[in-house]
Image (cartoon, rainbow, N blue to C red):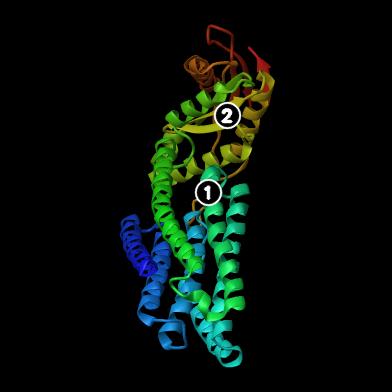
Amino acid sequence: MVATVIVGMLCVHLLCFGGMFLLIGARLQGRKLGMDAFAVGNLLLGTAYVLQLLGGPPGWNLMGVVNHTLTLCAPAVYWVGAMRFFDRPAPLWRPLITLALAYSALQVLVQWTLGPVARYAMLSGLSALAFLAMVVTVIYGVRTFARHLRVEMVLFAVLISGICALNAAKFVNILSGGLEALDMSNRFQMVFYIYMSFLATVLAPSVIWLVLRRLTDDLRAMAARDPLTQLLNRRGLTEGLEAHFRSRNAGPAHLFVVDIDHFKRINDTWGHEVGDTVLCHVADVLRETARKGDLASRVGGEEFVIVCRDTDSGGAMRLAERVRSAIERHGVPIGGGREPIRCTATIGVSHGFATAHGFDRAMQQADAALYHGKAAGRNRVVQSADTDSTPAATQANGSTSTA
């Protein structure tokens, strides 16, 4: 009686959270983060336990076959949901239907050839293998695509390992004790259902919490990114600098301002859509040219900023020249059979600064150098002078000179 009550509560829990997952997935619209698959997994497993309660003692009937099929399909669906949560595309319905039909046919074959004990043992054995595969995937994720969720993934691995071990023990019990090992009043079965209830109680809210965390992280990232180019905006750049200088081993940083030459003329001649294409092209050049660890941002209009961390003045000048040369060298494809647009950029480079508070001063230096570069003819790299922000070095058409 107690086991029946536990299984009944488990059914209610699974089905309710399955409905909740469906509602959350519907609200997320295009990007469901695997909630649709988690909902299907809960509904499959909840329905399987309902059929177990209605089907009576273990035996051979249609309800039992469907129960076993749904039970085995549930871990596969959860795996799909986890992959989708981490933006790994994974198909659901076609593999699910194929698995359901194949396992139903396999049950019939095993029942006729080896009997009911083998059929029940097969379910426990395959379930143990499915959960083992999930544990291996989670551990792999901790080292690769889920490194930012290390603690949560380790917890999931431990919890899933528990149900994997219980299914393996159940497999052994069935082989040694026959169908009597599946009696609802059996002590092992009680432990099994209590752990399943505990697992469902812990994992379902944990999945919702992970979705909320993912959405919060995405909102934070959106607030720190320019929506057109996906480079950092000024807020993201400031946060990145603060994080850099909090490190004990942080070295000095240099920044340079990149301004697209005659950008207004491009907008007036070709239209704002082409202008946006040029901005995205320059952003791509910055991403490809900047070193790993440098901070690339768009701070407004046609103006971009790169912060070179842990480098000297010479390194910042060499990087700025590579950026200038790459922008000049690569045309911007605009489609419609038209020739690519060639554009250039003027770059002003600041002196080094060693704290986040030095950012504004460095921006003033780089802006002053940029102004001098525009006055000198554009398409050049100009380095600021010392404390008075007066430009001290210019680079025109790829050659460097000192003013």
- Label 1: which secondary element: helix
Q: What amino acid is at disc 1?
A: Leu
Q: Which mark is residue 155?
A: 1
| Residue at the spot 49% in from the left edge and 14% down from the top edge | 361
Q: What amino acid is at disc 2?
A: Asn
Residue 218 rendering spot, x and y as whole percentages: 42, 44
Where 122 falls versus 4 (above or below)?
below
Residue 119 rendering spot, x and y as whole percentages: 55, 82
Q: Is residue 388 visible?
A: yes
| Residue at the spot 36% in from the left edge and 74% down from the top edge | 50
Q: CA distance from mark 1 to mark 2?
A: 55 Å
Q: Quadrant of the C terminus?
A: top right
In this view, which residue lies farthest toward the bottom?
112
Left or right of 286? Residue 32 is: left
Q: Quadrant of the N terminus?
A: bottom left
Crowd class of label 2 (few under 14; some 14 to 19; many from 20; radius 10 Å) = many
Q: Is residue 348 visible?
A: no
Q: Which mark is residue 379?
A: 2
- Label 2: which secondary element: loop
| Residue at the spot 39% in from the left edge and 37% down from the top edge | 223
Nearer to us in this view, 181 or 232: 181
Residue 348 rendering spot, x and y as whole percentages: 55, 22
Q: Quadrant of residue 26?
A: bottom left
Q: Earlier in the sequence, mark 1 or mark 2?
A: 1
Left or right of 44? Residue 241 is: right
Where 28 falls versus 386 (above or below)?
below
Where 1 falls versus 162 (above or below)?
below
